[in-house]
Amino acid sequence: MTVAAMWEARAADGRGVELAAWVREVALPALRGSAGLVRTELFGAPGDRVLLITWWTGEPLPVAEPPADLLGRPAHRWSFISEHVE
């Protein structure tokens, strides 16, 4: 079973680059080497939004909380089970 864990946050105004850097420099290193972690992918979007998708074989580990001053609102989290891949 493969689980995709999605973590999405809107940065405080104008701080999207900083939030993405925090994910690369803090959140991702904390996950690397974790049992079951298959892949990670980081995205940016308009409106200073940052999306991290991690793929796991088994239960995903949570992404750490970023510093509150980087956030425009609390991060959202969802997990999905893979149903079909081509």
Image (tube, rainbow, N blue to C red):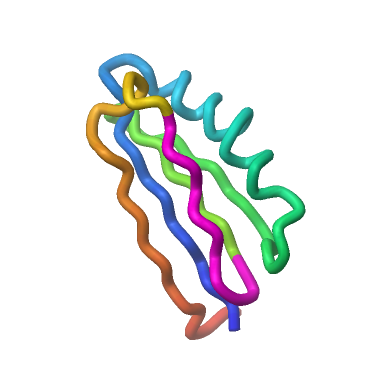
Residue that appears at 28% across and 21% down: 12
Q: Is residue 47 above or below residue 53?
A: above
Instruction: Give me the residue at 64% from left, 49% from top.
Output: 31
Residue 15 lies in quadrant:
top left
Residue 34 appears left or right of 13: right
Quarter of the image holding residue 46?
top left
Residue at (32%, 15%) from the top-left corner? Answer: 14
Residue in the picture at 66% in, 58% down: 39
**Residue 68 placement (x, y as % from top left):** 33, 26
Q: In the rendered image of this protein, does residue 38 appear above or below residue 32? A: below
Magenta residues (range): 56-66
In the picture, which quadrant includes the C terminus?
Answer: bottom right
Seen as rendered, the residue at the extreme top is: 14
In the rendered view, does 14 fall on the left or right side of 56? left
The spot of residue 23 in percent (x, y) is 54, 34
The front one of 86 and 41 is 41
Residue 51: say if magenta: no
The foreground one among 6 and 27 is: 27
Residue 65 x/y as whole percent:
43, 38
Please tell me whether residue 67 is drawn above or below residue 4 in the rendered image.
above
Q: How many marks?
A: 0
Is 63 one of the magenta-colored residues? yes
> Where, quadrant-wise, is the N terminus in this rendering?
bottom right
Q: Position of residue 16 (x, y in %)?
A: 39, 23
> Seen from this angle, which residue lies furthest left?
73
Majority secondary structure in the magenta region: loop
